[in-house]
Amino acid sequence: EDQVTQSPEALRLQEGESSSLNCSYTVSGLRGLFWYRQDPGKGPEFLFTLYSAGEEKEKERLKATLTKKESFLHITAPKPEDSATYLCAVLTGTASKLTFGTGTRLQVTL
Amino acid sequence: DAGVIQSPRHEVTEMGQEVTLRCKPISGHNSLFWYRQTMMRGLELLIYFNNNVPIDDSGMPEDRFSAKMPNASFSTLKIQPSEPRDSAVYFCASSLYGGQNTEAFFGQGTRLTVV
């Protein structure tokens, strides 16, 4: 069975304090790894897709990387508006099953 | 495109009543997912469809839950009879299976409260 584990469960940072979120996975036939952001009361919002080990994607203060066993979401100099829950998901199998981790709740304070 | 549209946004119902949640996927997308989100269990995949055909319903909790996709632009998730433990936020998502971009896009969710 596909497993996706995210850590830490919660993270509190001061504005400007860079850090990384981790997503480790055990799956058969990884076809893609996705990062989403979820704000309270809203649906997950797509951020990045990574398809192969060594791939990196960047968007503003966020950078996602992928190895054969895990992915990292690096947050550089975060701002309070980056506060949200960050979810990773894996796409596996021939029929596009999408499985999510439990997320990391990020709070960025002034 | 307006994105994935779910209705209703909020539903409060009494235990034992039938509840129907609705989803309109993004036009042109051929995969549709139903998820349930709770504080305890996070996002759980209930069922997903490819080209209107149910592929994996192993996440459906029990026979009280059923989902249909009669055409490419509409899907329903039905709970009959509903129970308080079904209270959660239910999300629908769609994606383009087999395309170059495979990311799934989510609706705003339906917050279900069963009292």
Image: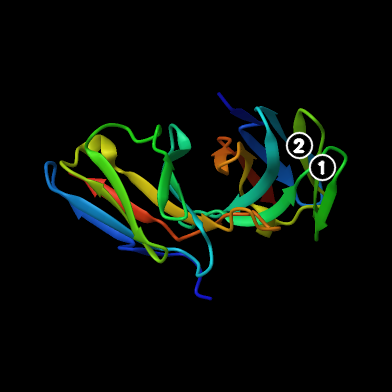
Q: Please tell me which residue lies in front, B92 or A105.
A: B92
State which quarter of the image contains the C terminus of chain B: top left
Measure how far apart labels 1 and 2 are at the Cα level.
Answer: 5 Å
Report the side of B31 relative to A49 (left or right).
left
Q: Chain of mark 1?
A: A
Have a look at marks 1 and 2 and say if they share a chain. Answer: yes
Judge whether residue B20 can be spotted in this image. yes
Residue B55 point in image, percent of width and height: 44, 41
Residue A93 point in image, percent of width and height: 60, 36
Query: Residue B65 sits in which quadrant?
Result: top left
Judge whether residue B47 can be spotted in this image. no
Q: Residue at x 58, y 58 (%)?
A: B96
Amino acid type for the residue under numbered disc 1:
Thr
Residue on which disc 1 sits: A65
Amino acid type for the residue under numbered disc 2:
Ser
Q: Residue at x 59, y 53 (%)?
A: B97
Residue A87 point in image, percent of width and height: 61, 43
Residue on which disc 2 sits: A71
| Marks 1 and 2 close (CB-CB < 8 Å) | yes
Report the side of A74 relative to B100 (left or right).
right
Q: Please tell me which residue lies in front, B50 or B45.
A: B50
Q: Residue at x 46, y 60 (%)?
A: B107
Above or below for A74 versus A46 = above
Coloration of the structure image:
rainbow
Report the side of A1 relative to A59 (left or right).
left
Q: Chain of mark 2?
A: A
Q: Please tell me which residue lies in front, A59 or B39.
A: A59
